[in-house]
């Protein structure tokens, strides 16, 4: 059953504000951040109540593992109908993360498996510490992806790799995950959060309309036939470049007041 939030227990997700960056942290390390329905509900509430001043979210997790995926203790009690509702509760919050107002930078360490990987796949930037590993052990547990991974993880690394991961239960190391495009950065153990904040500040410095177009138009364009995609792109380009902020930024560059693109940026 869908559970109500319990105000008497420790938060399953904590929120810390650092100026324009909100750090959302899965806070269930004793259960390896297994994702229960209560955690999904807390995540949803945290996202919905972010102050308007927040421009970027860093999604992190306490402890040695990002997330062991679905809270398996909730599986035995679920009927088929509840299972569908369960997936839809995840879909709702994951959609808010992926297509919400603010870009999300995830910090990944240790196990990033099952539903944990489905959650990570919602982020726009994935920073993995070199101890991270990625897997889809659903086949081993006799279940199936149910948090959108069939779609999101397949889009990231291809349906063939997802099939093989699920059939064999193999895991990808951090280096392998980077090589196949599952993550964007691999950093030393213990440095992921700092890297995520560095990237978050850069993202927060972009013009809001550019970030909006990247989050909202780019995924639509990717799903459109080429002729539609090009039309959407041209409209979005016209809207973003007509913003006063775009004019100011371009003028600043032309007047040699703005930073150049640097090798190693
Ligand atoms: C859990 C879960 C969980 C740990 N649900 N309780 N996910 C999996 O198949 C992964 C299952 N977990 C593991 O393989 C391991 O726990 C880890 C490799 C992630 C970490 O190992 P370790 O040795 O650090 O921890 P542990 O001793 O296995 O677990 C510590 C506690 O967390 C223990 O409970 P305790 O009361 O005995 O202390 C575990 O039972 C508990 N725990 N993982 C519930 N997943 C929307 S559909 C998505 C479908 C899926 O995600 S399938 C993949 C499920």
Image (spheres, rainbow, N blue to C red):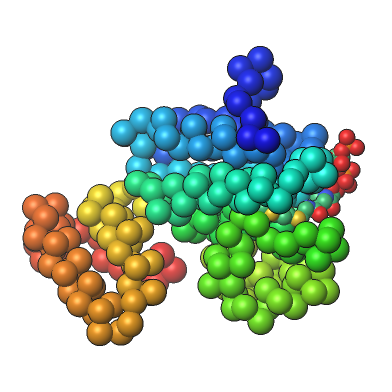
**Figure check: 85 above or below 258:** above
Q: Total number of numbered labels?
A: 0
Relative to residue 98, is residue 113 drawn left or right?
right
**Does residue 53 appear to the left or right of 111 in the view shown?**
left
Which residue is at the front of the view, 197 or 107? Answer: 107
**Does 261 sit above or below residue 37?**
below
Residue beneath the point at 56% across and 49% down: 88
Q: Residue 58 location in percent, x, y? A: 50, 44
User: Is residue 252 something that shows in the picture?
Assistant: no
Relative placement, left or right, of 185 versus 78 is: left
Classify residue 239 by image quadrant.
bottom left
Percent x, y of residue 41: 57, 35
Q: Residue at x 79, y 40 (%)?
A: 77
- The quadrant of the rendering that contains the C terminus is bottom left
Q: Nearer the viewer, residue 254 or 6?
A: 6
Front-most of 161 and 256? 161
Question: Residue at coordinates 34% horizontally, 68% vertically from top-left?
Answer: 220
Percent across and percent down for residue 217 are 30, 64
Q: Is residue 43 above or below residue 112?
A: above
Residue at image location 25% in from the left, 79% down from the top: 228
Q: Is residue 220 visible?
A: yes
**Image quadrant where one finds the N terminus:** top right
Q: Is residue 136 left or right of residue 52?
A: right
* Front in this rendered view, residue 84 or 247: 84
x, y percent for residue 214: 33, 62
């Amino acid at each position: 059953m869908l559970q109500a939030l319990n105000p008497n227990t420790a938060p399953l997700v904590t929120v810390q504000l650092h100026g324009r960056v909100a750090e959302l942290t899965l806070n269930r390390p004793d259960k390896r951040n297994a994702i229960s329905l209560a955690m999904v509900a807390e995540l949803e509430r945290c996202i919905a109540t972010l102050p308007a001043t927040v421009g970027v979210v860093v999604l992190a997790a306490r402890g040695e593992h990002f997330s062991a995926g679905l809270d398996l203790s909730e599986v035995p009690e679920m009927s088929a109908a509840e299972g569908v509702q369960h997936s839809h509760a995840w879909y709702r919050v994951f959609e808010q993360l992926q297509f919400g107002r603010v870009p999300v930078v995830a910090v990944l360490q240790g196990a990033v498996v099952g539903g944990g990987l489905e959650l990570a796949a919602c982020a726009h930037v994935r920073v993995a510490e070199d101890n991270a590993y990625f897997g889809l052990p659903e086949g081993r547990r006799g279940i199936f992806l149910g948090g959108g991974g069939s779609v999101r993880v397949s889009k990231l690394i291809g349906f063939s790799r997802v099939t093989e991961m699920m059939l064999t239960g193999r895991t990808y190391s951090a280096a392998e995950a980077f090589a196949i495009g599952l993550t964007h950065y691999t950093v030393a153990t213990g440095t992921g959060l700092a890297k995520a904040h560095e990237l978050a500040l850069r993202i927060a410095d972009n013009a809001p309309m550019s970030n909006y177009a990247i989050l909202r138009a780019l995924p639509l364009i990717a799903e459109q036939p080429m002729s539609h995609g090009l039309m959407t792109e041209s409209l979005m380009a016209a809207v973003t470049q007509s913003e006063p902020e775009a004019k100011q930024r371009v003028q600043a560059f032309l007047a040699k007041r703005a930073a150049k693109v640097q090798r190693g940026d």
